[in-house]
Image: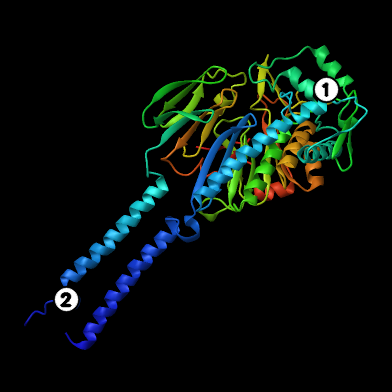
Amino acid sequence: MNVTARWKTRLILVLILVLIAAGIKVLGKRYLRTGENSVASYFFDNFAMGTVLTVKVRTDDKSLAEKGAELASAELHRIHKIFDPNDTESEISSLNRSRGSESAISVSPDMARLLGEALRIRNISRGNFEPTLGELIRLWGFSNNSHRPEIPDPLRIAVLADSLGGAGGIELIDGASSVRIAAQTGALDVGGIAKGYGVDRVVDVLAGIGIKNALVNLGGEIGVLGVGSNGRSWRIGVQHPRKQNCHLGVIDQVEGMFIATSGDYERFFLEKGRRYHHILDPATGYPAGRGTVSVTVIASSCLVADALATAAFVMGPEQGIRLLESLGVHGLVVYAQDGDTESGRLAYNATRGFLQIMKPELEGLPIN
Amino acid sequence: MRQRRFRLPRLFTFADLVLLLAVGGASFAFYGFRFWQDRFGLTEPGRLVVQTGERVVAQLDLSRDTTLSVEGVLGEVTIVVSSHRVSFVNAACPLKICEKTGEISRRGEIIVCAPNKVLAKIAGGGPDDSGGLDGISR
């Protein structure tokens, strides 16, 4: 073999090897999660605040992920002890017992923050979100885990809805560090939005120990940090309100945002073909009945998203969306076109911002 | 006329070619298999982890159809595994939210009966999460 042929052969050999190496590298990088994409994900599930907390942490530091999950559970346990209205030792129970007292009682920073937000949203929603429905919630029994709820005595509902003043009787003093509650104020029950607050706190706790990428899901209320699997955005489905195992679409531009959904499809019972659900209309004392089926809100805090989802649900598809639009948050209201939430055709209203993120598919997209 | 035979150059012998193909083929086969495993979640068989509170009370093979009754806080919850899909039936809870959850079949998905503190979670097998979703807002 002459010198030229030998060099040609060597060149071919080198080229083939380079191509093989490049092929392996490209495949490996694309599919085998190398480099940035090789970061592991850890999943933790635990019972908290009467539901399930799922924490997904994307990190190579397993001990950091475990520490995050542990702190998350502890934080929710702490929050639950403050806001559980069924616990006579809780701070909220003490506050409810203080109704009618001349003197203000001092409250924890958690209570101050949650109450401040709750009253703010009550005001901007003109009372459609009302944190003082404790007696009515107890009467309907939706928060009682051991008994099937039933329609209460209509007279009792009317008396409670009429006689108890709303959160207007709550006075926040000294920057909400203490609170005075008038005698005729309804009992505080912030069970729903306390979960949203819990998600906010857990996200803060995870960020505080250096976790950069995580998803916190507390019974369907969701907060995220950073990015998810394979370095892409976290992908959150919105539950279809009438089809099991189906979602309405995917929200994936959620970095630093929180998502909450209020719907009539989990906590409900049917009586003579009519649906009675847990979202009560403060004006009537009955489950909100303006044809709304579910509301999803994306906001910069889960507490706010949660409270606004409830307010928009009560206000209905037109006013609800107007409220969300006016506040600059993204929202979707699914409703029954003819008001018949059992068999009526579904439709939706959404804020402009929401539609830029997700186009709802009312036919439903399979989850599995 | 004398026929010219194709001859491999000395540096690139038949053995070189075989070795080259073997190494290249093996590399691609290995990475291809790894990709297939990763893509279709076949690194381990799917299993269902059942918890009451924080205690794991059972681990079921999803490839075997079975029914399991678990004692929860309020009473019994029946877990059905059928064709790699899992659902809760006849749960002793007032609102039956767990039954309304429907079926789960993918890694990371969970069904929960919160009043009974019973949780079933799919671990191992299957692609990540539900339909590529990291969570469901509900």
User: Label 1's element?
Assistant: loop
Q: Quadrant of residue A125?
A: top right
Quick one: A111 or A186, which is closer to the camera?
A111
Residue type beneath disc 1: Thr
> Disc 2 designates what residue?
B8
Q: How many angstroms separate mark 1 from mark 2 (CA)?
A: 92 Å
Residue sitting at x 37%, y 38%: B45
Mark 1, other Cα within 10 Å: few <14 / some 14–19 / many ≥20: some
Q: Is residue A241 above or below residue A268?
A: below
Mark 2, other Cα within 10 Å: few <14 / some 14–19 / many ≥20: few
> Disc 1 designates what residue?
A284
Question: Mark 1 belongs to which subunit?
Answer: A
Question: Percent from the top left, x then y, of residue B79?
Answer: 47, 24
Residue sitting at x 78%, y 21%: A136
Quick one: A87 or A333, which is closer to the camera?
A87
Residue type beneath disc 2: Leu
Q: Quadrant of residue A128?
A: top right
